[in-house]
Image (cartoon, rainbow, N blue to C red):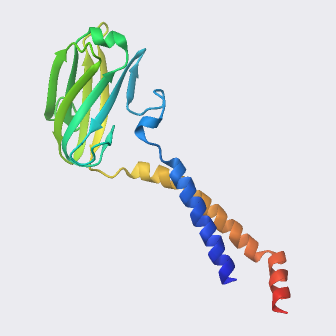
Amino acid sequence: MVRQMRQACAAVLILAAALHAGAVAAHGKVSMEEDSCVRRIGDSMVHLSAYQPQFEPSAQYCTEIPKGGDTYLVVDLVDLALRDMPIGLRVIKGTNETEDETVTYLRPSYHPDGVIKGEASLDQGLYTVIITAEGQPPLRYQYPLRVQMINYAHIFRTAVGPLIALLVLTLFGYKLMKSKRMQRWRASRRS
């Protein structure tokens, strides 16, 4: 009986680990339409990437920055029309543009290569990256940044699948152990 319970628990743990590993998606392995770092207004798209090479040289982030410190921001102007108009970038501490402190400001200019590069020193907390395009009509893109903060909603969404699988398998194991067949089988093993 104990051996069977151990085997059932091991199977549940392996299944939960497999489901959990499948739920994780790296930033760069999704299509543009599904990428959370892309902002779209009509046909115009921009893509934000954040880097902290002093901590993790090859890591690329979007809205969840793991540590405070110097952060390099790179905005890719996906839409070619955006390269022909002045584009500016502003990073504010907080979420209210009029009341909160500006951390970094790059005045609007042309970016024919389609890349805007900026740097900001970010402490723990909430920030907002605002990208403005001075075209007709003017365009405005926003990215909320969470620096060195735990995203409980993301943890919950990631954990729900494995937890449901664990509960279903536990219920299945319980029903199996309480079934009449199992009780008859145990009785026949004892005699």
**Residue 45 position (above or below residue 37):** above
Tell me where residue 155 appears, x and y as whole percent: 43, 53
* Residue situated in front as seen by the camera: 27 or 57: 57
Residue 178, horizontal then vertical, whole percent: 75, 76
Most extreme residue toward the bottom is 191
Taking depth in this image into account, of 18 and 57 the one nearest to the observer is 57
Can residue 95 be seen from the camera position used here?
A: no
49, 181: nearer the viewer: 49
Residue 116: where, in percent of width, then height? 24, 23
- Please tell me which residue is depicted at 62% across the width and 76% down the height of the picture: 6
Query: Image quadrant for the N terminus?
Result: bottom right
Does residue 142 lie above or below 123 as drawn?
A: above
Q: Above or below — where is 101 with respect to 166?
A: above
Count how many numbered circles sit on residues in the image.
0
Q: Please identify the quarter of the rendering in which residue 44 is found.
A: top left
Left of 22 or right of it: where is 177?
right
The reply to whether residue 9 is in sight is yes
* Rendered residue at 28%/47% (across/down): 56
Residue drawn at x 69%, y 70% as measured from the top left: 173
Residue 12 locus on image (x, y percent): 61, 65
Is residue 181 shown left or right of residue 57?
right
Q: Is residue 22 above or below residue 184?
A: above
**Residue 184: quadrant of the picture:** bottom right
Q: Quadrant of residue 191?
A: bottom right
